[in-house]
Image: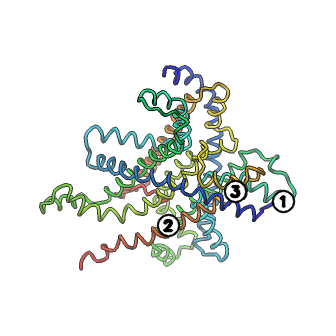
Amino acid sequence: MGFNSDYFWECLRSGIIYIPNTIKLVFISLLTGFIFGTIIALIRVYKVPVINKVLAIFVTVYQGVPIVVALLLYNLLFMLEFNNLAKFLNLSKTVKDVDNIWVGIFALTLTAICSMSEVIRGALLSIDKGQDEAGYSVGLTKVQTIRRIIVPQMVPVAIPMMINNIVGLIKASSVVMAIGITEIAAGAIIPGSRTYSFFEGYAAAALIYWTFTVLIEYLAGRLRKHTGKFKRSSYD
Amino acid sequence: MGELFKWDRFFENIPKIVPYLSVTFAIVIFATVLGVLLGIVIAFVNMKKIPVLHQFFKVYVSFMRGTPMLVQLMLVYYGLPVLIDSAFGTNINREWSAITFAYITFILNQGAFLSAIFYSAITSIPYGQTEAGLSVGLTEIQTFKRIILPQMVRVALPPFGSDLVGLFQNSSLVFLIGVTDIMGRAKTIGTATKHVLEAYVFVAIVYIIISLIVRGLFKYLNDKFEFGKARKTIMLDEI
């Protein structure tokens, strides 16, 4: 026993091969999450009747469900019901034809929608109501006010929280190995399954994730400096 | 579709799953209490900038924040026996139960996250306040206890609340190393009866209720600690 470094490098290489899977999981979920999250945030901030309440309840309740529980639940429903659904929709596909990475993407997407909507809502609420009014008073339309006045101020507020979310989602994506999707963590332990020594594999996975998050946080720090620029010169 | 979800199976599962809530709560309580202690130690070291330890904890916190909980859990579960057994010739792999590894992981993880919360709460209070305290003749400890701490608690409370909600959710991962918490119990019900959907739905509901209670509690505490100071609080997800 002990830590075998040759073995560690083998695990590291194996984990790196599966980085595209993690990126696929995170990127698709983030993009969808961002689009729907923005819509939900706008509906909630501008208080569209009824839908506003429904979405508020949905977001609060859904954020209470651990991602691994949601994931296993969706995977189960997918396995049990996909064939019936495909038959109902006249699709010639069965459960075997569909890669279950899409179940992982679905679970991560719902999580991302909820967290993104909260980030964007928080950023929207951080901007004074007077700014909207000022926009209207100089004759801008609602859309113009949002685009030219609100969004540029939101970005520096939203970025730190957004980065936390992205990092959180990258970390959460490791959970999909519970339903047999091979991403970084599951990929890194493949060499280990021959000998039942998983320590090196998980150490390799940890190193890859760590590199990722440190890199993202470094880039975020630079981005924040860049987007916050206008604040310093507001009275020039 | 009729067979998929049955309410009588759902209600049958409740008494089978509820006792295992104690496992979930044990993990959360251990992790919070010992994690707070560890977090205080790390925050203290970072404040005082004690050489070597300060750099070590910086890397440690970055690692804990930068890697998935699942990977940390597995690292401790598979790694600790390798490290300790080869150093001391023990056999903790057999002797320790899986939940011990879960406790260790969650304490180490919470210590890192909580230290970041405490550290940013302390530094959010201007250093001038400490100087003011010292200038009127308070000792360093008195200044901290009477001036910094009461203000710090209010700043640290919202992120501490969302951290606790996250901790409850993360504790559901322990079934992956074979600990029978409520999620693990739902899985064993599944293997025994071939009907697991009802159990999963019940577990999801339990977690939703827990998170609503914790959020409600912290909202109440937050209002209580306002001290009449009108303040716009955005729940910053600093974690």
Please state the chain letter of the residue tagged with numbered disc 2 in the rendered image.
Answer: A
Determine which of the numbered discs, if any, sits on residue A217 in the image: 2
Q: CA distance from mark 3 to mark 1?
A: 18 Å
Q: Secondary structure at mark 2?
A: helix
Between circles 3 and 1, the one closer to the viewer is: 3
Can residue B21 be seen? no
Q: Could you tell which of marks 2 and 3 lies nearer the N-terminus?
A: 3
Same chain for labels 1 and 2? Say yes or no.
Answer: no
Determine which of the numbered discs, if any, sits on residue A201 in the image: 3
Residue in the foreground of this view, choosing between A10 and B175 = A10
Residue in the foreground of this view, choosing between A206 and B148 = A206
Label 1 crowd bin: few (<14), some (14–19), many (20+), radius 10 Å = some
Image location of residue B42, percent across then percent down: 62, 66
For the residues bearing labels 1 and 2, Cβ distance under 8 angstroms: no
Q: Is residue B129 left or right of residue B189?
A: left
Q: How is the structure coloured here?
A: rainbow
Q: CA distance from mark 1 to mark 2?
A: 36 Å
Give the residue displayed 36% in from the left and 55% down from the top.
A120
Please state the chain letter of the residue tagged with numbered disc 1 in the rendered image.
Answer: B
